[in-house]
Image (cartoon, helix red, strand yellow):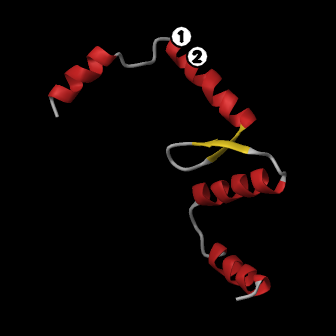
């Protein structure tokens, strides 16, 4: 199958999408790949991260820890005992 045919088939399938979150993920994917930004990591959900996005996530996580939003190993071990 040539590239033009693949694009047409993709567009037809894309037009059937009703999930706005999925469309947003496609938009983000295209933005990253078409802007030639280098992907340095992926989230556990498989979303690509540029260096800027990765650093922002780290800063956000550090802020959460600083504000006390974390689980200690001890608390996690207690939780596991109840599984």
Task: Kindly give the residue lying farthest to the left in the view shown.
Answer: 82
Residue position for label 2: 63
Q: In this view, does 83 lie to the left or right of 48?
A: left
* Foreground pick, 5 / 17: 5
Left or right placement of residue 70 versus residue 50 in this view: left
Task: Report the residue marked by disc 1.
Answer: 66
SS type, badge 1: helix
Graded by Cα atoms within 10 Å as few (under 14), some (14 to 19) or many (20 or more), the crowding at tag 2 reads: few
Work out which quarter of the rendered image holds the C terminus and state it.
top left
x and y percentages locating residue 19 in the rendered image: 56, 62
Callout 1 environment at 10 Å: few (<14), some (14 to 19), or many (20+)?
few
- Residue 29: image quadrant is bottom right
10 vs 21: above or below = below
21 relative position to 33: left or right: left
Q: Residue at x 59, y 55 (%)?
A: 21
Looking at the image, which residue sits at the far right? 35
Badge 2 vs badge 1, beta-carbon distance below 8 Å:
yes
Taking the spot 82% from the left edge, 57% from the top edge, the residue there is: 34
Seen in the picture, residue 68 relative to 46 is either above or below; the reply is: above
Q: In which quarter of the image is the N terminus?
A: bottom right
Name the foreground residue: 21 vs 41.
Answer: 41
Residue 27 is marked as: none
Residue pictured at 75% horizontal, 58% vertical: 30
């Amino acid at each position: 199958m040539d590239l033009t045919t693949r694009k047409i088939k993709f567009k037809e399938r894309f037009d059937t999408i009703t999930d706005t979150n999925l469309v947003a993920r496609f938009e983000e994917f295209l933005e990253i790949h078409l802007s030639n930004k280098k992907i340095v990591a992926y989230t556990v959900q498989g979303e690509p991260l540029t260096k800027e996005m990765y650093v922002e996530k780290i800063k956000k996580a550090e802020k959460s820890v600083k504000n006390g939003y974390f689980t200690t190993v001890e608390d996690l071990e207690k939780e596991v005992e109840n599984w």
